[in-house]
Image: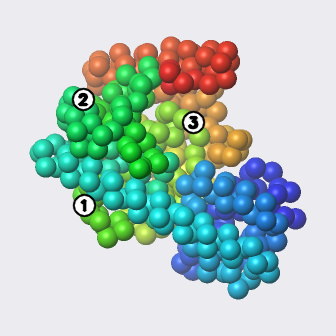
Amino acid sequence: MTLTDRCAGGMFEAMGTLLLADCEPESHHPFAKQWFAREIENVFSLDETQFHDFLEQAKKQRVLRRLLDVLKNKLSHATREYTSHQVSAALSEEKARVQTALRFLRCIVDQFEQRGEPVMVIKTLDHWPDTGSDIDLLTSAGPQTVSEIFAKGFGAQKQPQSWGDHLASKYNFRLPSLSELVEVHVGCLGQTGEKKSLALQLLARQVYEVFGERLFPVPPCEDRIVIAALQRMYRHFYIRLTDIVNITASLVHNQVNFESLRQISDVGAVWRGVATLLVISRQQAVCCGRTFELPEEVKATAKFNHQRTYVARNFIRVPILPEGASLFMRQLVENGRRHDFRAVMRLSLLPMLATAAYVSSGITGNDKGIW
């Protein structure tokens, strides 16, 4: 059965298997090699249009570059000429796009650092060598300073803010010659900007790592996981394949200090969401041929597991009711217990914002200007 004959869940699992089942033998599922060989055969049996669609799906999952590297190493199994051509062309295009993005990103970071303004790249480089469809930064600089940096330094156009952007103190800029939007989180994180203390602590913990021969300030591993949980379990309510792959790599290589992860999560009152994301990631990784264990505390803290999720519209979906709502209420209660009234007040606006977005989507077909 080819990949196109499978359900959306099968497609997600197929890409995951190609990325996870052919790695270090010590973390293999017993059937990993067989699963990997099956998926390679299925991919190389796709016709030209189907193969193109497969690569487009990988782009949506933020795993295109990593998947192309896997396919390139297995091209000896390909029986159709267009397969090699599409892989080579896609690789060249991705390398050029990422190099341009890194060049601009390094210049942007330089502008902030030259002014003495703390800045850090978040989310964008978590998928390396893949990058996202936009560039995300976190800074404690004021909104006016941020706007000046982009306007004077890059001739950038500031994009209109949605209601959610206003609450979250997010600003988007369009730079000439850069295909990606640059999104700047100013002094806080979270859908309503409720994570002010967490954002400032993240900036203080930043580390410098090399990406494409350029040095960038990024969050440590534990902070990356917390940011991913904020985005997936408390905002979008869907998980990309890249989240599974990123988290799996960190856990398999023992890069996560769980005590630190718990402490960081507690600052934002999102420990249950973080633990839930870790449990779902592990269970999905096992389905794709990769095995590892989680501490008992993490498994006990998780609010639900992958059996409560489902694949729809290309991603693993987290049901808003009751699972997403339960995590939200727990976060609200925890902030109340800590007397973080700023967070409580902002979080209380989220249901109204979500309702407005839902109504707008029903009337106009999208939630632009709101969410």
Sequence-wise, the earlier of marks 3 and 2 is 2
**Which quadrant of the figure has residue 37?**
bottom right
Which is nearer the eye, 42 or 90?
90
Residue 198: image x %, image y %? 28, 37
Q: Residue at x 80, y 81 (%)?
A: 79
In the image, what residue occupies the spot 62% across and 15% down? 359
Q: Nearer the viewer, mark 1 or mark 3?
A: 1
As helix, strand or loop, the secondary structure at mark 1 comes to strand
In the rendering, at what x and y percent does residue 358 appear?
Answer: 61, 19
Disc marking residue 208:
1
Quarter holding the N terminus?
bottom right
Q: Mark 3 to mark 2: distance in Å?
A: 28 Å
Give how far across and how far down residue 236 sits, in percent: 54, 35
Count residues near mark 2 (Cα–Cα under 10 Å), then give few for <14, some for 14-19, many for 20+.
some
The numbered mark, 1 or 3, whose residue comes first in the sequence reads 1
Q: Amino acid at mark 2?
A: Pro
> Which residue lies at the image location 36% right of the left edge and 48% below the top edge?
122
Separation of marks 1 and 2 at Cα, in angstroms: 24 Å
Q: Which residue has dot 3 on it?
A: 237
